[in-house]
Image: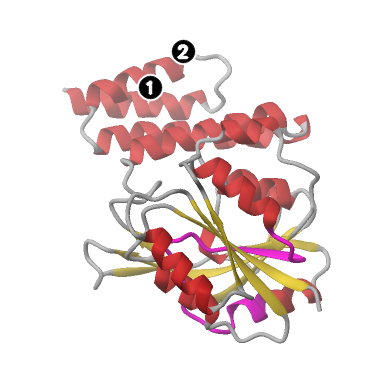
Amino acid sequence: MSVKVSVLTTTYNHEQYIGQAIESVLAQQTDFLWEQVVAEDCSTDQTRAVVTAWQRRYPDQIKPILRERNIGGRQNFLDAFRACRGDYIAILEGDDYWTSPHKLQQQVDFLDAHPDHSICFHAVETRDEADPHTTKVVRAARARYTLEDLLEQNMIPTCSVMFRNRLFDSFPDWYLKAPAGDWPLHVLNAQHGDIGYIDQVMAVYRVHAGGVWSPKVSSDRRRQILTILRLFYDNLDPAYRPQIEQSLARWHFKAVNALLLEQDYRGAASYAWKLAADPDIPRRALLKNSLWAVQARLH
């Protein structure tokens, strides 16, 4: 019997988390074969020891990739992606974990029943390690989304996604330039089918100081979103450009607001003035409103 699902896990310095991630995969109850590809990027803590200990116990399920030197998150992910043999790929980063033993089965059943869908995701719980008693559930508003929705914002939590393998031949060069890889990956897949949502909480996204995305201040995160949107604008079908332009305008406005909330009033003023003077930025009236907001704060 062939592998139905490959669980793609990248990990680096996740000594205190990776065991729970692996254990949550091993808890899955399925009527198909799955594998977990764990790409360990030469951690400086005991992450590798934890991975190899689990692999010795479950050699048929856990397929480690152990680096001799650190190669960075993006290349580590790409190598793990290419090693996935399953018809479907589910992503679980080494610091997150799944909470339902039926997650994989439900998502496989969904994609098997919806051949016009390329992606499936579900609700997740966000948990901050600095305050573990305070949690938030992230839900989507609809049962079905399209590529056009995804070009507005990334609504798919990484630890919730499952998608069909081999939808595209290779990653384009522009993918390597993106500051985050999950959203561009979803866009590449969504060009081949719609996106389904299951309204059940089946995973925990962990926020902690060692994370790649969550520790960044809001203005930095929004600037990175703008970088990704610009890559979409420059490299996707030109038919999508009007929509991406609107998304760029909205996220520029959000970047200005983030700088204001961070009390970087001079930075917000400089950013807003540049946007207001740029003839290529749509919704200039909206951006000028942000300028007035900056000026009010400065006075």
Residue visible at 48% across and 73% down in the picture: 54
Q: Real-space Cα distance between discs 1 and 2?
A: 9 Å
**Residue topped by disc 2:** 277
Q: Residue at x 27, y 63 (%)?
A: 129
Residue 119 in percent (x, y) is at 69, 61
Under circle 2, the secondary element is helix
Rendering quarter of residue 61: bottom right
Type of amino acid at the residue the image marks with label 1: Ala
Residue 245 visible to the viewer: no
Could you say whether the residue bearing mark 1 is in a helix, strand or loop?
A: helix
Query: Split into 4 quadrants, where in the image is the C terminus?
Result: top left
- N-term-proximal mark, 1 vs 2: 1
In the image, residue 169 sits, relative to residue 268, either above or below, namely below
Residue 91 percent across, percent down from the top left: 58, 61
- Which sits in the foreground, 272 or 86? 86
Q: Amino acid at mark 2?
A: Ala
Q: Is residue 98 magenta?
A: yes
Q: Is residue 191 visible?
A: yes
x 47%, y 42%: residue? 69
Residue 28 appears in which quarter of the rendering? bottom right
Q: Residue 210 location in percent, x, y?
A: 32, 51
Q: Is residue 26 toward the left or the right of residue 260 in the image?
A: right
- In this picture, which residue range is highlighted in magenta? 84-107
Residue denoted by label 1: 272
Q: Is residue 77 above or below residue 27?
A: above
Give neighbour class at mark 1: few <14, some 14-19, many 20+ (Cα, 10 Å).
Answer: many
Q: Is residue 269 found inside the magenta-colored segment of the image?
A: no
Q: Is residue 58 left or right of residue 83?
A: left
